[in-house]
Image (cartoon, helix red, strand yellow):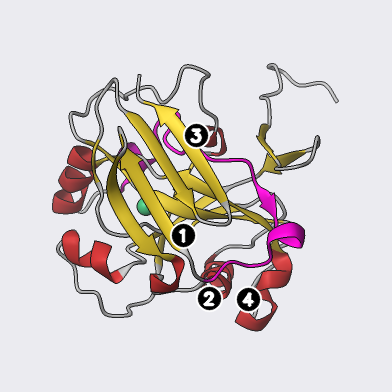
Amino acid sequence: MKTVIPLPLPTLLPVAGAADLFPVRRVYCVGRNYAAHAIEMGHDPDREPPFFFQKNPDNLISPDAGFPYPPLSSDVHHEVELVIALKAGGKDIAAGDALDCVYGYAVGIDFTRRDLQAEAKAAGKPWAAAKAFEHSAPCSAIVPADVLGHPAEGPIWLAVNGDRKQQGDLNQMIWKVPEIIAELSRLFTLAPGDVIMTGTPSGVGPVKRGDTVTCGIDGVATLSIAVV
Ligand code: MN
């Protein structure tokens, strides 16, 4: 195949315990999926239908130096999240079949330009500039579900310079993994390579250059990254 410009490189994530890589097609994110975080952001924690936004596949890849603090913001927040990596997809997937679509899980950070998000919310504008900026979604290696199973409970946490800022449990997710996949597949045709970030527990807050952000989901993975 000849292309009129150089073919863009695919986004490839490492897989724990394997030499082969996981190719990323799309990145979906769930908003407001832990009640305590919904409350801290000034929203009702009731079980409203989930809503989704997107990041870009290459946002998952971090430079060796760390997470580059993005321009045009002075209030970049950390959000630690369980990440789902799909090996199969489809439309209108039943919740009872959804886990069959999962290749594995990882821990990731949904870095957010909170000041731009607040402006967008106030103006009824989209969140892309607040969410889908360069390197905004650092992610651990993916742990295959064949090895891990399907985690539904367990601590999810994030620390900045060793100080614990976020502490939750996967069992606090308002919409569970099978429900998220089912709901998302009503809106979009899911496919192998799709990645879903599943929302963050409470305790979000700012980072600054020089910080080291460490996060994890016990029994799944950990991730540590410098803000540069
Ligand atoms: Mn988030």
- Reading the chain from its start, which is encountered first: label 2 or label 3? 3
- Reading the chain from its start, which is encountered first: label 1 or label 2? 2
Q: Which residue is mark 2?
A: 179
Q: Nearer the viewer, mark 4 or mark 2?
A: 2
Image: magenta residue range: 126-152
Residue 66 vs 190, above or below: the answer is above
Q: CA distance from mark 2 to mark 3?
A: 25 Å
Question: Does the magenta run of residues contain 160?
Answer: no
What SS does tag 4 mark? loop
Identify which residue, 219 or 28, lies in the foreground: 219
- Reading the chain from its start, which is encountered first: label 3 or label 4? 3
User: Label 2 near label 1: C-beta < 8 Å?
Assistant: no
Give the class, few, some or many, for how many residues have Cα within 10 Å of label 4's Cα (few <14, many ≥20): some
Q: CA distance from mark 3 to mark 1?
A: 16 Å
Q: Nearer the viewer, mark 4 or mark 1?
A: 1
Q: Which mark is residue 198?
A: 1
Q: Which mark is residue 167?
A: none
Q: Residue at x 66, y 24 (%)?
A: 8
Q: CA distance from mark 1 to mark 2?
A: 11 Å
Question: Does the magenta run of residues contain 134?
Answer: yes
What SS does tag 3 mark? helix
Disc 2 marks a residue whose amino acid type is Glu
Give the class, few, some or many, for how many residues have Cα within 10 Å of label 2's Cα (few <14, many ≥20): some
Disc 4 marks a residue whose amino acid type is Asp
Cβ of mark 3 under 8 Å from ligand 1: the answer is no
Q: Which residue is mark 4?
A: 92
Looking at the rendering, in which quadrant would you find the N terminus? top right
Residue 105 vs 21, above or below: the answer is below
Q: Which residue is mark 3?
A: 59
Looking at the rendering, in which quadrant would you find the C terminus? top left
Decide if residue 63 is on the left or right side of residue 21: left
